[in-house]
Image (spheres, rainbow, N blue to C red):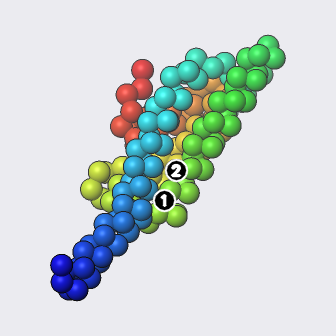
Amino acid sequence: MTFSGFVLGTIGAIVAWLTTEFIGRPFRRFFDLRSETARRLVPFDNVFARMRMVDGLHREPIELSPSQDARLTEAENIFRDLASQMRAFTQAEPIAASIVKHVCRYDAWDASRALIGYSNEISTEGPMRASFKAQVGKLLRIQIS
């Protein structure tokens, strides 16, 4: 083995490691978040709301049992956490986020906004809750029942 062969092999190994660590792993993280979002939408699809929209402007409270209220709170927290992870991905991994956006056609920033909206509106029955859920599905191309 010559010295130049060793140097080229070392440079190749460093480039491969950098590509894997700074592009491949974050890129995979996005798809893990997408999968986790799809997984979490199913068990919380039928969570009861605390409020109901009346005439499009006013909200009316709905009586929930303690277990139903706890489940709703859990759903709010989980979707807010998924939104924060998606937002962190877009801000901390700009190269991977750019590849996800321009090559795969997923907008992680808009998906994080839709998840925040859904986490805020999941406690109110009505069109806004359904709209944010549909946005999440559309942006992440998740089949929503």
Pointer 1 local density, CA inside 10 Å: few below 14, some 14–19, many at least 20: many
Q: Which residue is mark 1?
A: 90
Residue 58 lies, in percent from the top left, at: 72, 30
Residue at image point 54% right, 55% down: 87
Residue 33 lies, in percent from the top left, at: 48, 43
Residue at image point 41% right, 64% down: 22
The residues tagged by marks 2 and 1 sit, at their Cα atoms, a distance apart of: 7 Å
Q: Which residue is mark 2?
A: 86
Q: Is residue 26 above or below residue 129?
A: below
Q: Is residue 56 above or below residue 114?
A: above
Side of 10 relative to 115 (left or right):
left
Q: Residue furthest bottom?
A: 3
Q: Nearer the viewer, residue 120 or 41?
A: 41
Q: Is residue 57 above or below residue 116?
A: above
Residue 65 lies, in percent from the top left, at: 79, 13
Residue 101 lies, in percent from the top left, at: 35, 56
Amino acid type shown at disc 2: Met
Side of 44 relative to 139 (left or right):
right
Pointer 2 local density, CA inside 10 Å: few below 14, some 14–19, many at least 20: many
Q: Nearer the viewer, residue 12 or 31?
A: 12
State which quarter of the image contains the N terminus. Answer: bottom left
Asked where in the image residue 20 lies, by quadrant, the reply is bottom left
Asked where in the image residue 64 lies, by quadrant, the reply is top right
Asked if the residues shown at circle 2 and circle 1 are in contact, with their CB atoms under 8 angstroms apart, the answer is yes
Q: Is residue 112 visible?
A: yes
Residue at image point 63% right, 42% down: 80
Q: Secondary structure at mark 2?
A: helix
Asked where in the image residue 66 lies, by quadrant, the reply is top right
Amino acid type shown at disc 1: Thr
